[in-house]
Amino acid sequence: MDVFSDLIRGVRAHGSLFASSTLSPPWALHFVDGAPLTLCTVIDGAGWLVPEGRPPELLRARETIVVRGPGTFTFVDEIGTTAEPIECGEDCATPEQGGTRHRLGWHDPGGDAGGCGGGQVYGGDGQGYGRGNGPGATTLIVGAYPVRGEISRRLLEALPVVLRADDGGASDAVLDHLAAEVAVDTPGQQVVLDRLLDWMLVCTLREWFDRPGGERPAWWAAQRDPVVGDALRLLHAEPAAPWTVAALAGRTGVSRSTLAKRFADLVGEPPLTYLTRWRMTLAADLLVEQDDATVADVARAVGYSDPFGFSAAFKRVRGANPSEFRGSRRPSPAR
């Protein structure tokens, strides 16, 4: 498995499309959850995305912005809009809270056309806040992504607070599918939307990492190297193997010295240092997710036969021993 696939595997949409709205100005949507990652894309029209504590970003048709939490953001028709912000969050997509199954708002052709030539758009609380398909209408799709575990947090660390992907590229085809799917209500729609959002996020991140002159993480560029890329795939595919630099060099078909220098130059640290940090990341998730696993069990799962040696390495890398780390990640008992 390549590094990117490993890091993004815990970032999955699951009922996360909480806004698919056709809005006519003036409008203002305040997304209050501060999700780890939120993908915003405009099907048609335009608007301004205003991240907390950051400059506004104009988002035109078929452009996408990914916002990294925990800060919140607002999406408005224009800077200084007169619209009262509508709070949007996870409850907007929860039927039990008055929301719809798939989206915050929808265009209802049978509604009162009023002066806008469109139907009423409803918020998660059932209150109308705009009219769709009127002059200057904007269709917005927003998907929020939870991030599971320490593995995917390494991906978040490589991203800026606001990441822009302009129109064009592989994500355009995904956007076409996404626009078609949100236009209808069909059985299994949420599953399709979730997977399309996952696809859209992967395409957006890949294109952003590959942009000319970009500040990409070292592991992204290193994946493309024929030697270091192979070494990284081996370490991620077999993290518990008894790796030495010589063994890794043998599997990649180069000398020990060549691998050691090339790996350090491209990744920024020696191969076994990288491996130790990756093992401790895997161990951190195992400690939290597998309550019945002992420290010795987790040690063996990441390549340590000696739990004491594992505990020492874990504390050196994570700043706490495995038992302390596990205790700090457990939810507080309800009162």
Image (tube, helix red, strand yellow):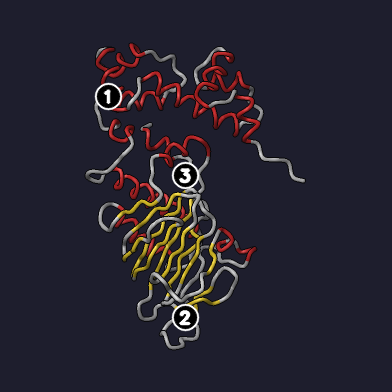
Q: Secondary structure at mark 1?
A: helix
Quarter containing the N terminus: top left
What amino acid is found at the position of numbered circle 1 in the picture? Answer: Asp
- For marks 3 and 2, the one nearer the N-term is 3
Q: Residue at x 47, y 75 (%)?
A: 83
Task: Where is residue 89? Give x, y as percent.
Answer: 55, 60
Q: Residue at x 41, y 56 (%)?
A: 54
Q: Are marks 1 and 3 in contact (CB under 8 Å)?
A: no
Q: Nearer the viewer, residue 39 or 50?
A: 50
Task: Where is residue 313? Give x, y as percent.
Answer: 52, 18
Above-or-below relation of 327 to 50: above
What amino acid is found at the position of numbered circle 3 in the picture? Answer: Val
Q: Are marks 3 and 2 in contact (CB under 8 Å)?
A: no
Report which residue position mark 2 lands on.
119
Report which residue position mark 3 lands on.
11
How far is mark 1 from mark 3, CA to CA?
29 Å
Residue 133: quarter of image = bottom left
How far is mark 2 from mark 1, CA to CA?
59 Å
Q: Report the residue that reaches farthest toward the left.
A: 212
Disc 3 packing (10 Å; few <14; some 14–19; many ≥20): many
Q: Residue at x 61, y 21 (%)?
A: 295
Q: Residue at x 42, y 61 (%)?
A: 50
Report which residue position mark 1 lands on.
265
